[in-house]
Image (cartoon, rainbow, N blue to C red):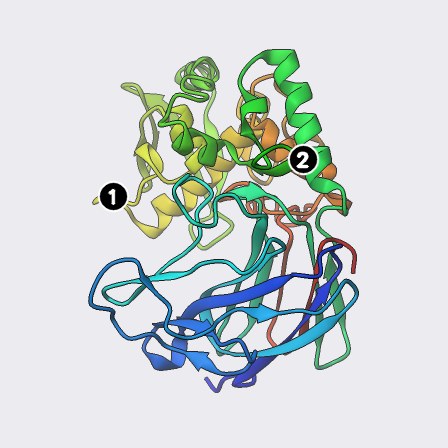
């Protein structure tokens, strides 16, 4: 099949922040260069494919920071086809990217206090631009910081929008996390990271990031009682039906010998709280018994556990409705708060936040199209 997309894509960057020092970096894997690590140079058009350095944590030898002008200014950059792409933006100066042998790009981390970017205000949007489509989303999976909106214009003149968080979205999220912590004392307030030296909120970590940053102490057994209740429910007379929304159709499971077992999809042991927030460890890990079907079912179970709907709904996810998410006292309140705060509720707040009923309301904050013309990021909130 011939490619549908153009070899390159234009991205319009808008400084909707109050900062005169907004910087953007673009990283990914260059699909037409053997998936080589990629950065875009400071001119906004020249690819940089770094060679393998002689040692770890080697500084970039070229400038890959794209500076925008004062508030209200715009700049257009051009990218080739990329997988695993990220558009990074920071208001406290450029971010530091390093190289390890391989080569491998060492990206900024909010979970490592020794990272040179840890005390800066920054965020990113995720995308893949391949032969057949552009896919892009507003991600809160790791943390919330600077709001960003997405606008995708197609060659046919269609315009699609994800408005993301409002301009004061970070402060709203942080306030709601503190309010939830006051109610249940579970630790939600500890996800709020203040600016170094005071002066407001720097970011709000996701529960998974918070658990990693705390060494596993935060939220340690938060979901344990609810998982026990779910397992008891499906060990009794009820079965759990998972619609794979693919060729496998419905698969039905029950708890047998302590595991939630599905014919053809394998058995899932009880997940820990960390497994639920990460969606990628314990029974949700891609282990030796992984198959496409098992991964499909795992995604739907993990999504239902984050939204706390398995006690109320035994048909996943086709029996779900957005208004039924996060109704239990024990739930992923970070995800709930991100959706409540986002304009029209759209944003990607945990790894399987795109799971939902086929004809339901999309909450994932994603846009995609096979004939994209221009992608616009409103950095700082607003279109």
Give 106 or 344, whichever is nearer the viewer. 106
Location of the C terminus (image quadrant): bottom right
Measured as percent of width and height from the top left, residue 109 is found at 43, 47
Give 219 or 69, whichever is nearer the viewer. 69
Q: Is residue 62 left or right of residue 374?
A: left
Q: In this view, does 111 lie to the left or right of 9?
A: left
Label 1 vs label 2: CA separation?
45 Å
Q: Is residue 228 left or right of residue 180?
A: left
Give 151 or 233, whichever is nearer the viewer. 151
Instruction: Using the image, determine if residue 382 lies above or below residue 128.
Output: above
Mark 1 vs mark 2: give the one in front. 2
Instruction: Using the image, determine if residue 145 lies above or below residue 153.
Output: above
The image quadrant of residue 322 is top right
**In the image, what residue occupies the spot 71% across and 36% down?**
171
Packing grade of label 1 (10 A; few <14, some 14-19, many >=20) is few
The image quadrant of residue 259 is top left
Instruction: Using the image, determine if residue 13 lies above or below residue 78.
Output: above
Labels 1 and 2 touching (C-beta < 8 A): no
- Residue under circle 1? 287
Measured as percent of width and height from the top left, residue 286 is found at 30, 45
Measured as percent of width and height from the top left, residue 33 is found at 35, 80
Element class at badge 1? loop
The residue most toward the front is 197
Element class at badge 2? loop
Measured as percent of width and height from the top left, residue 228 is found at 42, 14
- Residue under circle 2? 199
Answer whether residue 15 is visible to the viewer in this image: yes
> Sequence-wise, which precedes: disc 1 or disc 2?
2
């Amino acid at each position: 099949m011939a490619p549908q997309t153009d070899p390159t894509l234009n991205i319009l960057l808008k400084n909707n922040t109050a900062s005169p020092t907004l910087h953007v970096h673009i990283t990914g894997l260059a699909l037409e260069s053997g998936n080589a690590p990629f950065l875009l140079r400071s001119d906004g058009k020249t690819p940089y494919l770094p060679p393998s350095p002689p040692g770890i944590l080697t500084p970039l030898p070229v400038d890959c920071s794209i500076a925008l002008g004062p508030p209200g200014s715009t700049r257009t950059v051009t990218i080739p086809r990329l997988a695993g792409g990220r558009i990074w933006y920071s208001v406290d100066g450029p971010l530091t990217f390093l190289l390890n042998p391989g080569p491998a790009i060492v990206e900024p981390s909010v979970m490592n206090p020794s990272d040179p970017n840890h005390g800066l205000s920054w965020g990113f949007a995720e995308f893949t631009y391949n032969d057949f489509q552009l896919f892009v989303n507003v991600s809160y999976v790791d943390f919330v910081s600077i709001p960003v909106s997405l606008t995708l214009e197609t060659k046919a003149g269609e315009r699609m929008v994800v408005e993301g968080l409002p301009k004061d979205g970070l402060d709203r999220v942080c306030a709601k996390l503190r309010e939830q912590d006051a109610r249940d004392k579970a630790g939600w307030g500890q996800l709020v990271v203040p600016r170094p030296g005071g002066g407001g909120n720097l970011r709000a970590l996701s529960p998974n990031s918070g658990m990693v940053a705390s060494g596993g102490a935060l939220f340690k057994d938060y979901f344990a009682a609810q998982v026990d209740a779910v397992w008891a429910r499906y060990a009794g007379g009820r079965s759990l039906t998972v619609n794979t929304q693919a060729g496998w159709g419905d698969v039905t499971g029950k708890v047998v010998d302590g595991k939630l077992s599905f014919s053809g999809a394998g058995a899932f042991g009880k997940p820990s709280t960390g497994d639920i927030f990460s969606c990628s460890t314990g029974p949700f890990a891609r282990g030796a018994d992984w198959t496409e079907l098992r991964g499909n079912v795992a995604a739907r179970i993990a999504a239902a556990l984050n939204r706390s709907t398995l006690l109320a709904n035994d048909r996943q996810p086709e029996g779900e409705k957005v208004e039924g998410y996060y109704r239990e006292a024990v739930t992923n309140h970070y995800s709930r708060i991100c959706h409540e705060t986002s304009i029209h509720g759209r944003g990607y707040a945990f790894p399987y936040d795109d799971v939902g009923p086929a004809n339901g309301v999309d909450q994932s904050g994603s846009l995609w199209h096979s004939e994209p013309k221009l992608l616009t990021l409103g950095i700082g909130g607003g279109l």
